[in-house]
Image (spheres, rainbow, N blue to C red):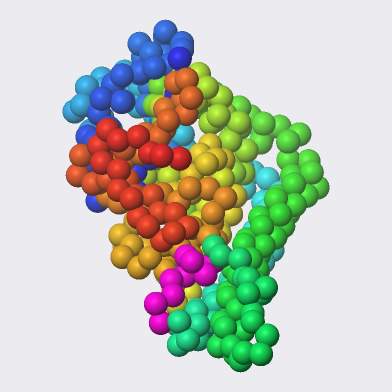
């Protein structure tokens, strides 16, 4: 048996996610018969920070759909919380020197992101200005054609003045160059964050710290005993920090291999991607930017939650730009009613599950295609 991932864009209420994925929670596909029988559900609510354990409404919804509690003392052992936010909090309290070093790492990454965003803001503004200039000479031009075509210089006929064509070629090359710089800036940030993370771990001997190993072993054991893991949205940075600090990607991948079902929403869905792309509400112009590396469990797709809220879905120029900039993966938009199933049985397949909304794929042509319930995505 092999696991599956059910990815949602955004839920109006956490309970709605439980009700919408009821059959997948109840139908365990874990290779361990005891785990299949137990149907343990692990909640990851680190994005709620200090409210991590305020999950009684979720437990109530799980009980309503048929997950029966199994108490030991006052605690249910069948629906558990990974408690990774509080595990990191405990580590910081007991290991202040390492916590200080980790805070320095965070500050360096914060300053790096600020420089990255400043540079990207310049490039994006330059790209949009160049496109507006180009439209003055070619009113019907679309960005997807501009970014996909190769400038032909050999067609010029001697003895004729074609200044507009030359200027148009210049603007096209400028657009291509600017988008390439944006892509390279994303890669540069990824490399730097990776290096900072590795240097921190090696520099403080994190993987040899007894408390760290104890906490990490406990977290991994919880994940590997889970029939279902549900990752909720909220504060993305805190969620990513906690999961990444304890280096839990390998446990996620192993749990998936053994047959665990992962259900994610909003920030929880972003964590699964190779790269975490966010909509910067506070940036000038409000643009999509690279936030950090994800867990890479969804390698061939770039997920965009809150699709209709964050993406100008009716603007083909905007869709083409996003698909070119983040074009190493297929760009997929998800809304509140959108559910994407990635099934690890046999070959990985992607299928739309939502009854109320579809899954949206947009490509470099600027086209947006909707996949409704039961339809398999063309990847």
Q: Residue 232, image x and y in percent?
A: 38, 43
Q: Is residue 145 inside the magenta stretch?
A: yes
Of the 4 image quadrants, the one containing the N terminus is top left
Q: Residue 335, image x and y in percent?
A: 30, 51
Query: Along the line of sight, which residue is nearer the eye, 229 or 184?
Result: 184
Q: Quadrant of residue 127?
A: bottom right
Residue at x 47%, y 70% (from the top left corner)? 143
Residue 377 visible in the picture = yes
Q: Is residue 317 inside the magenta stretch?
A: no
Looking at the image, is 304 positioned above or below residue 46? below
Residue 47 visible in the picture = no
Residue at x 40%, y 54% (from the top left corner)? 362
Of the 4 image quadrants, the one containing the C terminus is top left
Q: Residue 34, image x and y in percent?
A: 42, 9
Query: Along the line of sight, which residue is nearer the eye, 308 or 281?
Result: 308
Query: Along the line of sight, which residue is nearer the eye, 161 or 8?
Result: 161
Residue at x 73%, y 40% (from the top left corner)? 206
Looking at the image, is 286 positioned above or below residue 33? below
Residues drawn in magenta: 139-147
């Amino acid at each position: 048996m092999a696991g599956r991932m059910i990815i949602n864009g955004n839920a109006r209420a956490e309970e709605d996610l439980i009700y919408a994925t009821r059959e997948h929670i109840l139908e365990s596909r874990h290779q361990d018969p005891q785990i299949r029988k137990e149907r343990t559900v692990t909640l990851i609510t680190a994005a709620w920070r200090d409210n991590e354990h305020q999950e009684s409404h979720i437990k109530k919804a799980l009980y309503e759909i048929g997950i029966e509690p199994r108490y030991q003392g006052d605690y249910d052992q069948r629906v558990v919380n990974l408690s990774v936010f509080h595990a990191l909090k405990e580590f910081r309290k007991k290991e202040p020197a390492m916590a200080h070093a980790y805070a320095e790492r965070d500050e360096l990454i914060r300053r790096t992101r600020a420089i990255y965003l400043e540079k990207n803001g310049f490039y994006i503004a330059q790209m949009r200005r160049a496109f507006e200039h180009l439209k003055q000479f070619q009113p019907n031009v679309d960005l997807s054609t501009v970014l996909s075509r190769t400038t032909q210089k050999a067609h010029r006929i001697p003895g004729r003045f074609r200044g507009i064509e030359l200027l148009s070629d210049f603007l096209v090359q400028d657009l291509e160059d600017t988008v390439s710089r944006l892509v390279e800036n994303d890669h540069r940030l990824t490399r730097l964050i990776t290096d900072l993370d590795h240097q921190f771990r090696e520099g403080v001997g994190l993987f040899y710290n007894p408390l760290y190993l104890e906490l990490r072993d406990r977290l991994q054991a919880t994940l590997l005993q889970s029939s279902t893991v549900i990752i909720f949205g909220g504060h993305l940075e805190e969620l990513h920090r906690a999961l990444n600090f304890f280096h839990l990607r390998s446990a996620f991948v192993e749990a998936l291999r053994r047959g665990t079902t992962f259900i994610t929403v909003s920030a929880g869905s972003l964590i699964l991607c190779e790269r975490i792309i966010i909509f910067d509400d506070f940036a000038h112009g409000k643009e999509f930017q690279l936030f950090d590396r994800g867990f890479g469990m969804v390698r061939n797709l770039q997920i965009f939650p809150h699709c209709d809220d964050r993406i100008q879905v009716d603007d083909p120029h905007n869709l083409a730009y996003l698909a070119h900039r983040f074009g190493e993966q297929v760009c997929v938009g998800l809304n509140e009613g959108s559910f994407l199933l990635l099934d690890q049985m046999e070959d990985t397949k992607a299928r739309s599950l939502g009854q109320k909304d579809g899954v949206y794929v947009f490509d470099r042509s600027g086209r947006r295609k909707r996949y409704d319930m039961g339809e398999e995505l063309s990847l």
